[in-house]
């Protein structure tokens, strides 16, 4: 893959053979984010689990203390008095059955997170084929299937992110923007790593954290020393 001059310049500052501490890695990632837009700082965490086994699934959600720097649009599936509650909490869209054809037939996906009350999961389940592949399906583990709509919306708006394994047993999540201070990125990243460590499956034998890489949207990856987080 051909990389641009900016990428090549940024990559010169990073020793590919070294495993960095979080502070130094964050500093390098910030310096290498030289695109004309505010790049997202991402963490890519490879785990020593096998996600094909139910007891080794790692999935959950965590509220980053400084948010992600992104304005998140929330859709809530609710009925009765929960509709007003969701609207009062600041949900961008609230509805029920009437949203099914809009999403299914018109391809409307102008939202980032979907929350549903348990009594609406029968309705939401009909959207599994559309929402599932996009990672938008509400899930109790992520706190997006709940009767406490106010808390769910408030947490998401405050910077709650969901983490889960991909097919290669890697978690990919944003930890902020390049414009954040190093302290803010550090606190967000530490909070994320704490949550992932707590989610370690009890059945796992062997090394849990295989590798951690921090990168900005357009910048080179910086590898971290996993021992500090084990």
Image: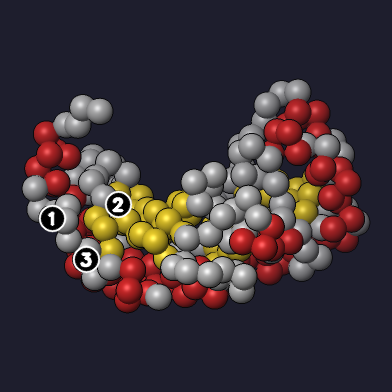
Q: Position of residue 34 (x, y in %)?
A: 19, 45
Most extreme residue toward the top is 105
What is the distance, in whole Å, between disc 3 and disc 1 at their CAs? Answer: 9 Å
Contact (CB < 8 A) between labels 1 and 2?
no
Foreground pick, 51 / 205: 205
Task: Give SS at disc 3.
Answer: loop
Which of the 4 quarters of the picture holds residue 157? bottom right
What is the crowding at mark 1: few (fewer than 14 residues within 10 Å), some, or many (at least 20)? Answer: few
What is the distance, in whole Å, between disc 3 and disc 2 at their CAs? Answer: 13 Å
Residue 20, numbered circle: 3
Q: Residue at x 65, y 45 (%)?
A: 136
Dot placed on the residue nearer the N-terminal end, 1 or 2: 1
Q: Residue at x 62, y 59 (%)?
A: 57
Q: Position of residue 201 (x, y in %)?
A: 60, 69
Most extreme residue toward the front is 205
Q: Is residue 152 rendered to the left or right of residue 174? A: right
Q: Is residue 19 rendered to the left or right of residue 50? A: left
Dot placed on the residue nearer the N-terminal end, 3 or 2: 3
**Disc 1: which residue:** 15
**Disc 2: which residue:** 215
Which of the 4 quarters of the picture holds residue 31? bottom left
């Amino acid at each position: 893959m051909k990389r641009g001059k900016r990428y090549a310049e940024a990559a010169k500052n990073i020793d590919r053979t070294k495993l960095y501490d979080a502070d130094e890695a964050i500093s390098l990632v910030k310096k290498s984010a030289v695109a004309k837009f505010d790049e997202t700082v991402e963490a890519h965490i490879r785990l020593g689990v096998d996600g094909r086994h139910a007891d080794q699934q790692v999935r959950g959600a965590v509220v980053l203390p400084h948010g992600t720097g992104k304005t998140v649009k929330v859709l809530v599936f609710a009925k009765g008095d929960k509709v007003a509650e969701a609207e009062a909490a600041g949900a961008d869209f609230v509805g029920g059955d009437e949203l099914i054809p809009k999403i299914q037939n018109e391809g409307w996906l102008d939202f980032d997170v979907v929350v549903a009350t348990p009594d609406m999961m029968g309705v939401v389940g009909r959207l599994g084929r559309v929402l599932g592949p996009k990672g938008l399906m509400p899930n109790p583990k992520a706190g997006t299937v709940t009767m406490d709509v106010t808390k769910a919306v408030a947490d998401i708006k405050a910077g709650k992110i969901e983490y889960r394994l991909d097919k290669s047993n890697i978690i990919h999540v944003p930890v902020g923007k390049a414009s954040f201070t190093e302290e803010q990125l550090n606190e967000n990243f530490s909070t994320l790593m704490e949550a992932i460590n707590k989610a370690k499956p009890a059945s796992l034998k062997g090394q849990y954290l295989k590798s951690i890489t921090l990168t900005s949207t357009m910048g080179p990856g910086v590898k971290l020393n996993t021992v500090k987080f084990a």
